Image (spheres, grey):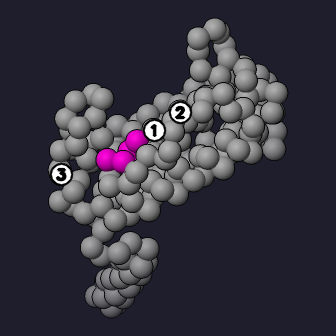
Amino acid sequence: MLKIKSILFSIFAAAILLVVIDSASADNPPDQPVFVQEYLKQLDFIEGRLLQLEGAMAQDHMSWSPAEDIRSCAQIYLHVAGANYFLASKMGGEMPEGEMDESIIDKDKIADMMKESYKVVKKLAAEVTEEQLNETVQTPFGEMSLRYFMTALLNHMHEHLGQGIAYARMNGVTPPWSAEQEGEG
C-alpha cells in the first residue's frame, strides 16, 4: 500500500510540475532571456504603482513640493518618464523630440506621458537579447552593461515611487494599495 501511495504521489507531483513549467513557458517566449522576463514583470508592477499613486493625488497637489528647489509631485512622474526614454535610447530607441517639460502639471497629461514612456521601454526591453544585455553602454554614471543599467533604472523608478509615497502622505493621501490594507478603501 505504501508503494502505491508513493507512486501516486510521484505522478501527482510530476503533473503539477508539468503544469507549472507549461504555464511559465506560455507567458514567456523561449528565446527571451529570463532577466528580460523578470524585468518586464517589474516594469508592470512599478508602472501600476506609480500610476495608481499619481491618480490618487488631487490636481492641486501636482505643483506641491516640500521645499524650494525640490521636485514637485508632477516633476517626480515626469522625471521617471524622461528616464524611461533615456533607457529606451540605450536599447536602440530614440528620445522624444525636446526634453520633458517639467512645467506640466496636468494630471491626465502626466499619466499619458508615463504610460507612453513605459510602453516604449517595455516594447524595446522585450526585444533585448542575452548578448545585448552584456554589451557596454555609456551612461551619465560611466560605462556599464545594459543589464546593469536596466537594473539601475528600475531601482531609480522604485526610489521615485518612495518619494511619491512620501509626498502623498504629506498631503494626506494614502496610496491606494495601502488604503486597501489599512481598511480605508
The foreground one among 116 and 30 is 116
State the image coordinates of residue 72 (x, y, percent, origin top left). 65, 22
Label 3 Cα neighbours within 10 Å, binned few <14 / some 14-19 / many ≥20? few
State the image coordinates of residue 96 (x, y, percent, origin top left). 49, 47
Q: Quadrant of the N terminus?
A: bottom left
- Which residue is the site of mark 3? 134
Q: CA distance from mark 2 to mark 3?
A: 26 Å
In the image, what residue occupies the spot 67% across and 17% down? 65
In the image, what residue occupies the spot 73% across and 29% down? 62
The foreground one among 136 and 167 is 136
- Which residue is the site of mark 1? 83
The image shows a total of numbered marks equal to 3
The foreground one among 131 and 13 is 131
Magenta extent: 86-90
In the image, what residue occupies the spot 50% across and 45% down? 97
Q: Is residue 142 above or below residue 91?
A: above
